[in-house]
Image (cartoon, grey):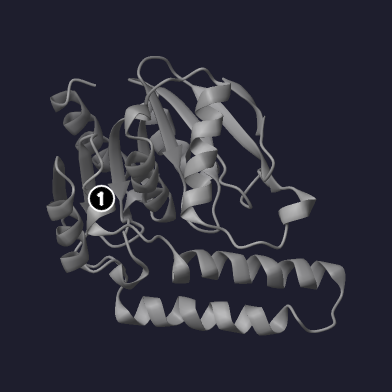
Amino acid sequence: MKEGYADNRFASLYYKELGQGVPLVMLHGNGESHQIFGRLAELMSRYYRVILMDSRGHGASKLKDTVRTQELTTSGMADDVMQVMDVLHVPKAVILGFSDGANVALEAASRYPDKVLAVVAVSGNALPKGMTAVSYAQVKAGYKFWRVVEKLPMPRRVKERAVSGRQLNGLMANWPHLTAAELSLIQAPVLLLTGRRDMIRPRHTLWMGEQIPDAKVVFVKGADHFTLLKREKAYAGHIVGWLREKGL
């Protein structure tokens, strides 16, 4: 296992590597870190060179002081993925993302088609309104709440919590913005894994699959938004089987 940091002008990005073979970057969801992939990363490292990373403003990846209070965006995070790949001398990789990580993976594939071999997007969305009405209303309310709270006089640590709350809710409320035209730019094959009980509307997932030239949509039986983190072996079977079909 190797670990380190890739620096850019926005963040110091933590990464960790395990396994050998075709590079596979794994991206966690909102408010999480690479540690959520403990069991799944172990399973995937039997077949691939797994590259785990913490997104900017998450886990061990720290925002630089000059941008510490700026909004988080999926486009910026997609740039970060490319940064880590460049530091590790990885010209092309499979990108597997969960939740917000899936959104970043799709954004990276749209913006950097020559750098992405394939995408596995688990419970991702292309537009904020791809979430159910209740979930979308909750993150919008959270974003507005923390925007107000952070302007109040308070101790530094409480202020930092308010800023983080605003950033994380804003990431879901305002991003991504992948239009049909942008999704059509994705050249890599894409596997969209979701469930009928996901916080992402099934109709939205199907719409995404229609826009991406080489996409496969799979509704995992009985799955909700977090089933990936509970049934790692089953999901690994879906993912490895599909990648093998694509020659990866």
Look at the image and tell me whether residue 220 can be seen.
Answer: no
Which quadrant would residue 239 be assigned to in this image?
A: top left
For the point 53% across and 49% down, the residue is 76
The residue indicated by pointer 1 is: 183
Look at the image and tell me whether residue 111 can be seen.
Answer: yes
Which quadrant would residue 137 be assigned to in this image?
A: bottom left
Q: Is residue 41 left or right of residue 56?
A: left
193 vs 206, nearest the viewer: 206
Residue 28: where, in percent of width, then height? Answer: 47, 47
172 vs 231, nearest the viewer: 172
Helix, strand, or loop for circle 1? helix
Q: Where is 246 relative to 209, above or below?
A: above
For the point 73% across and 57% down, the residue is 68
Residue 7: where, in percent of width, then height? Answer: 68, 34
Q: Where is 31 relative to 248, above or below?
A: below
Q: How many marks?
A: 1
Q: Where is 243 relative to 97, above or below?
A: above
Q: Residues within 10 Å of mark 1 (few under 14, many from 20)?
A: many
Which quadrant would residue 236 be assigned to in this image?
A: top left
* Three-letter amino acid code of the residue under disc 1: Leu
For the point 50% across and 64% down, the residue is 171
Q: Residue furthest top?
A: 20
184 vs 33, nearest the viewer: 184
Residue 66: where, in percent of width, then height? Answer: 77, 53
Q: Is residue 84 left or right of residue 49?
A: right
For the point 71% across and 55% down, the residue is 67
Q: Is residue 111 left or right of residue 233?
A: right
